[in-house]
Image (cartoon, rainbow, N blue to C red):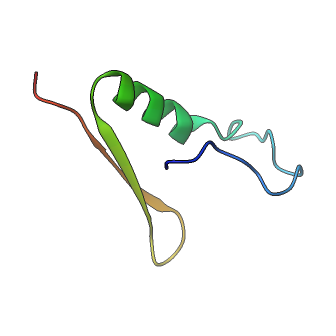
Amino acid sequence: MSEPFRHHTTDRLVTAKGAGLGLSIVRSVATAHGGTTAARPRPGGGLTVTVSLPAE
């Protein structure tokens, strides 16, 4: 999640599910609050995203 979101093709830029900006927004919010994010691919597809925020 260290790179800005980009689609390789233009066929799915905006869908009924959204514009694909969710992870970029999550990363920006976490960073603004002193936190971190990490994303790992899941074996069957998709991602596991972990957000860590400081206690104070």
Residue at 80 percent across and 57 percent down: it is 8
In the rendered structure, the answer to whether residue 13 lies left or right of residue 52 reads right
Count of marks, rendered view: 0
- The C terminus is located in which quarter? top left
Q: Residue furthest left?
A: 55
Residue 14 lies in what quarter of the image?
top right
Q: Position of residue 36 (x, y in %)?
A: 31, 40
Q: How far from the left and from the top, in percent, is residue 39?
A: 42, 56
Left or right of residue 12: residue 48: left
Task: Provide residue 25's location: percent of width, then percent of height.
Answer: 52, 30
Residue drawn at (27%, 27%) of the image = 34
Residue at 86% in and 56% down: 9
Vertical order, 15 against 43 (above or below): above
Residue 35: give x, y in percent of width and height: 28, 33
Q: Residue at x 72, y 47 (%)?
A: 6
- Toward the bottom, the furthest residue is 43
